[in-house]
Image (spheres, rainbow, N blue to C red):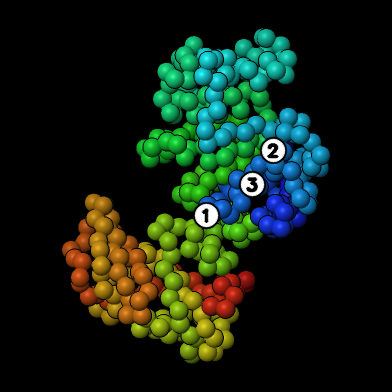
Amino acid sequence: MSDLELRGVTKAYGAAQVIKGVDLHVAQGEFCVFVGPSGCGKSTLLRMISGLEPISGGEVRIGGEVVNHLGPAERGLAMVFQSYALYPHMTVRQNLSFGLENLRAPKSEIAERVTAAAQMLQIDKFLDRRPKDLSGGQRQRVAIGRAVVREPRIFLFDEPLSNLDAELRVEMRGEISRLHRRINNTMIYVTHDQVEAMTMADKIAVLRDGRLEQFGRPLDLYNTPDNTFVAGFIGSPRMNFFKGHVRGGAVTLDAGTTVPLPAGKFQLAEGAAVTLGIRPNGMKPGNAGLPLTVASVERLGGESYLYGTAPDGTAVTVHSPGQTRIEPGTQIALALDADDAHLFSTDTTRSLLRKDA
């Protein structure tokens, strides 16, 4: 296994710049997830790492070696795609061994690696079947097994679970996480699903419009987002945002309430335009606070979600533990927990959290 480093990596198609100077270091053995909205450049960046897409500028380093000039087969990587890309006329055993046969590995070594990978991924009972005789989850295990048998320096996953149903996605998330713990290899995983990112990653790279917005551990991104984009993207449901101004150590919201802020936590300038962010579980129905008109209610049994609008038209989502009696059309007030509040500059969208807080 090896580490991965990107230094000022760019990609342009003619005048269109799609990757705009990405700097990133993934340590040896880490599970790193590239996440972001559609079109942010995450799959393009993965293809540049793999060698399937030439880079326009910067360096890709694997194990300290610059690999810009190396083709995909020379980089020692293995890639698992969104489509299973299995050979339909071959059995599972043949699909697993095909890459090693092309590398002219000894037959005994091929048999040993195929058996080990099949047992690890629980597909050893299907070795003589063809892909058409397998379920979607079994096919994805075969695609992953084909990568495992190569014993690559780094694994690359390009939205491998997108074709699976919700229940199977959860199961396969666990399978891939367990695989990482077993083999302790460096893995780069692309997804648009931030729940996958939060539950699987050691580190998350949040991308937007070809730029790296923030890189760090999942809970660090959740608890201390660098800007409103990361704050709104990481966490489900997304964070609520309210416009306001700093007044005497508190934020007066345009939505109609004042939120006192913990002393010394934020960099505050009197009168500054700010955006206050608070997650759905940081607000509770109470006797006073932010007015809310409830538009709809989701009752999930063990928890409920209220959706509504504040007086200034701001859309608001509230998490309510357990079962609620609040009905659509109800007017309620919300108490905002100041300790759970995030504060951002409205002008720059950057966090105002003090670095020494």
Q: Which residue is mark 1?
A: 37
Q: Is residue 205 visible?
A: yes
Task: Specify which label sits upstream in the sequence, 3 or 1.
Answer: 1
Q: Earlier in the sequence, mark 3 or mark 2?
A: 3
Place of residue 174 in the rendered image (x, y in percent of width and height, measured from the top left): 46, 36
Contact between marks 3 and 2 (CB within 8 A): the answer is no
Residue at the front extreme of this rendering: 14
Q: CA distance from mark 3 to mark 2?
A: 9 Å
Name the residue tied to disc 3.
Answer: 44
Quadrant holding the N terminus: top right
Residue at 35%, 69% (x, y): give it.
316
- Residue type at mark 3: give it: Thr
SS for callout 1: loop
Q: Nearer the viewer, residue 227 or 58?
A: 58
Q: Which residue is nearer to you in this view: 341 or 171?
A: 171
Task: Say what amino acid the circle numbered 1 marks.
Answer: Pro
* Badge 3: residue crowd in 10 Å (few <14, some 14–19, many ≥20): many
Question: x, y percentage for residue 79?
Answer: 62, 33
- Tell me the kind of residue under disc 2: Leu
Q: Is residue 328 left or right of residue 47?
A: left
The residue closer to the viewer here, 41 or 107, is 41
Q: Secondary structure at mark 3?
A: helix
Q: Is residue 105 above or below residue 332?
A: above
Position in image of residue 323 (x %, y %): 22, 58
Instruction: Specify the label residue 52 is tagged with.
Output: 2
Q: Are marks 3 and 1 in contact (CB under 8 Å)?
A: no
